[in-house]
Amino acid sequence: MASNASVLQKYLSLPQKGAIMAEYIWIDGTNNIRSKCKTLYEKPSSPADLPEWNFDGSSTEQAPGDNSDIYLRPVAIYPDPLRLGDNIIVLAECYNSDGTPNGTNYRHECAKLMDAHSGAEIWFGIEQEYTLFDNLGNPYGWPAGGFPAPQGPYYCGVGNGKVYCRDIVEAHYKACLAAGITISGINAEVMPSQWEYQVGPCPGIAMGDELTVSRYLLHRVAEDFGVTISFHPKPLKGDWNGAGCHTNVSTKEMRAEGGIAAIEEAIGKLAKRHKEHIAVYGEDNDQRLTGRHETASATTFSYGVANRGCSVRIPRSVAKEGKGYFEDRRPASNIDPYLVTGIIVETILGSIPDVDVAKQVLKA
Ligand code: ADP
Ligand code: MN
Ligand code: MN
Ligand code: MN
């Protein structure tokens, strides 16, 4: 339900008497975000200052009812743009009662890979596409029981009838900036009521962290407007575009003079592990990767310069300058970003003992 914003405003400005509201957020057993809030009496300067906490994992598809405690270990802090003041958002990893990472905690292995390869100075930029729905389950702003005019005028659209829900998008953009998220831009997408924002470039593990917090903020802002966010990769069947999470990648070597050689070498390695990558590039991604609507097929790997019908694209400007980054166009909008950034590092920079990114998902 949408909140009554003008009434809420009155209470939000009440004094907190030095207390800090810390909204702990985590990824649940269905790849959605959950949160709960704790009062602190001292301002933390790093995650190590924050208390570990717990929740009932049997209510979030993360634990059985007879052993339901899941522990939240803080890993990153962001200023809370919705509560302002000293209030914070606390990103947490989930651990079982025996101290092992919970089956949904893909950050744990990802962080090991990022640490092992920190010398490569890898950066990521993720283009998060998503779709807005009303409370009846229709794309937000679409005519009741019908369809808008076919795709064409909506991508980067301007003007009434060409663009939907810009208010929510603007509010989310500002909220991300205020939280210190490296949001690098937004644009309206090909399907009406579908949008994209980009986060990055972010180094290593920060990519997954910032994308997760940006998704939390998107759900929260849309909640205030009474609108539902869908990250499904093919939210509507038929001649409507799907939604992805194009993942842009560069290492120090790729960004340096002559870096195109390192880019081509990396793409060669990606070609050899297409299956493993597809396994962690999002559920129902096969509905999106059809070879139509600016996608490549899910079953074969391809790459090209400036080609948006390929699995991997080298931007024209990168080919021209002979250095920069490449774009992996395969990941779906509903990815776990730690799985995706983790397997890219594993494939192009090398595996490490006791870590196998795809296996975490395939075992389930
Ligand atoms: P597209 O043309 O595919 O729509 P966008 O402009 O939407 O591209 O997104 C490009 C993304 O690439 C942004 O998130 C940006 O931060 C990221 N990016 C730019 N340079 C680099 C780089 N050197 N390494 C990794 N990511 C980068
Ligand atoms: Mn884009
Ligand atoms: Mn896009
Ligand atoms: Mn792209």
Image (cartoon, rainbow, N blue to C red):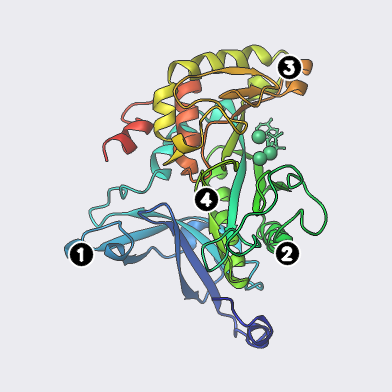
Mark 3: which secondary structure?
Answer: helix
| Cβ atoms under marks 1 and 4 closer than 8 Å | no
**Residues under labels 2 and 1: Cα distance?**
41 Å
Q: Position of residue 345 (x, y in %)?
A: 49, 28
Q: Are marks 4 and 2 in contact (CB under 8 Å)?
A: no
How far is disc 4 from disc 2 in space, using C-alphas? 19 Å
Residue 167 spot, x, y in % from top left:
73, 64
* Mark linked to residue 65: 1
First in residue order: circle 3 vs circle 2: 2
Q: Is residue 281 visible?
A: no
User: Is label 4 or label 3 in front?
Assistant: 4
- Give the alpha-carbon distance from disc 3 to disc 2, as whole Å: 37 Å
Residue lying at the far front in this picture: please name it.
Answer: 146
Closer to the eye: label 1 or 4: 4
Between the C-alphas of marks 1 and 4, the distance is 28 Å
Q: Are marks 3 and 2 in contact (CB under 8 Å)?
A: no
CA–CA distance in space, label 3 to label 1 = 54 Å
What residue sits right under mark 4 in the picture?
A: 231
* N-terminal label among 4 and 3: 4
Element assignment for label 4: loop
Q: Work out whether mark 4 precedes mark 2 in sequence or the reverse, and give the earlier one.
A: 2
- Please state which amino acid type lies under the numbered disc 2: Asp
Q: Quadrant of the N terminus?
A: bottom right
Residue at 69% x, 84% y: name it: 6
Q: Determine which residue is flagged by label 3.
A: 319
Q: Would you say the residues marked 4 and 3 are in contact, meaning their CB atoms lie under 8 Å apart?
A: no
Q: Which residue is mark 2?
A: 167
Q: For ligand 3, tell me if the residue under mark 2 lies within 8 Å.
A: no
Residue 212, percent from left and from top = 53, 52
Circle nearer the N terminus (1, 4):
1
